[in-house]
Image (tube, grey):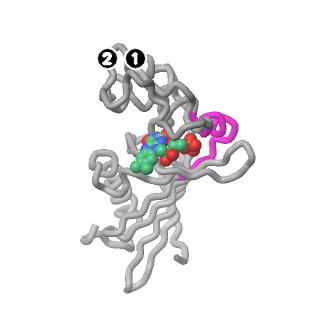
Amino acid sequence: MSMLSKENTNEIFEDIKKNLIRGVKDRKHTFHTPVFCNIDDQKAIESRVVVLREFDSPNMVLNFHTDFRSPKIASLVKNNNSLFVFYDQKLKVQLRIKTISSINNQNIITKKMWEKTKLVSRKCYLTQKPPSSITSLPEDGINDNLKGKEPTLEESEKGYKNFTVVQNKIRQIDWLHLAASGHRRLKIILKDNIPSFNWIIP
Ligand SMILES: Cc1cc2nc3c(=O)[nH]c(=O)nc-3n(C[C@H](O)[C@H](O)[C@H](O)COP(=O)(O)O)c2cc1C
């Protein structure tokens, strides 16, 4: 990023894509855990950290995984407008990425991804009560027989019906670069994955 011209829109666009790819692969990269926002059933904003699982650069799609029973699924079905926020202190770059979300459950996309998940990750999808449901005790919702251990492959398969891949098609990127010499801000609008650029005042 240090060699990047902060004035060349195509270079900035390529650099954004490069860093999103890094964010998927490198668990230590700050882009690995963006904030994902949507509108809930009461038309209120909801935001939470998610793990960036995939970035399909040619199609400009960002994916994360979640539990089908999570309230954000029903909200996204009603209103598929969503937004990711990324910030990297070293790069001094903030990305605000507007997306349209689609839900995948028990289909070819989830099947492919489920096969790649580790047993320990599958445990998240094995809670008895749905995520966000009220409980009388502080607990993680996992059955006693699975406490402190990995599920067997057979046990883990019960989680598949809950495993959900949220695909988020990028429609707009707001790139902000902070610099003592002058901040820069670029709005990138994507139509059929082709970017158009507008400089804006930071
Ligand atoms: C580092 C980190 C990574 C997380 N990754 C995910 C994720 O990939 N998917 C997810 O649904 N929740 C993830 N969570 C939990 C969410 O932030 C949130 O608490 C949970 O999804 C419930 O949110 P909801 O009530 O809006 O559905 C993560 C939390 C942290 C702190």
Please give the name of the residue rendered at 42% of the width and 72% of the height, measured from the top-left corner: 177
| Front position in the image: 9 or 97 | 97
Please give the name of the residue rendered at 44% of the width and 79% of the height, measured from the top-left corner: 183
Q: Could you tell whether 171 is left or right of 62 in the image?
A: right
The residue to which callout 1 is attached is 157
Seen in the picture, residue 63 relative to 190 is either above or below; the reply is above
Residue 60, visible in the rendered structure: no
Residue 157 highlighted magenta (yes or no): no
Question: The disc labelled 1 sits on which kind of residue?
Answer: Glu
Q: Return the x and y of residue 161 as percentages of the image width and height.
A: 50, 20
Label 2 residue SS: helix
Q: Residues within 10 Å of mark 2 (few under 14, many from 20)?
A: few
Q: CA distance from mark 2 to mark 1?
A: 6 Å
Q: Quadrant of residue 75?
A: top right
The mark found on residue 25 in the picture is none
Check the picture and name the quadrant holding the N terminus: bottom left
Seen in the picture, residue 199 relative to 139 is either above or below; the reply is below
Which stretch is magenta?
A: 70-83
Q: Return the x and y of residue 80 as percentages of the image width and height.
A: 63, 41
Please give the name of the residue rendered at 47% of the width and 36% of the height, measured from the top-left corner: 140
Question: The disc labelled 2 sits on which kind of residue?
Answer: Leu
Seen in the picture, residue 28 relative to 12 is either above or below; the reply is above
Q: Return the x and y of residue 105 as percentages of the image width and height.
A: 52, 24
Q: Return the x and y of residue 145 as percentages of the image width and height.
A: 38, 21
The reply to whether dot 2 and dot 1 touch (C-beta < 8 Å) is: yes
The residue to which callout 2 is attached is 153
| Front position in the image: 151 or 30 | 151
Residue 180, visible in the rendered structure: yes
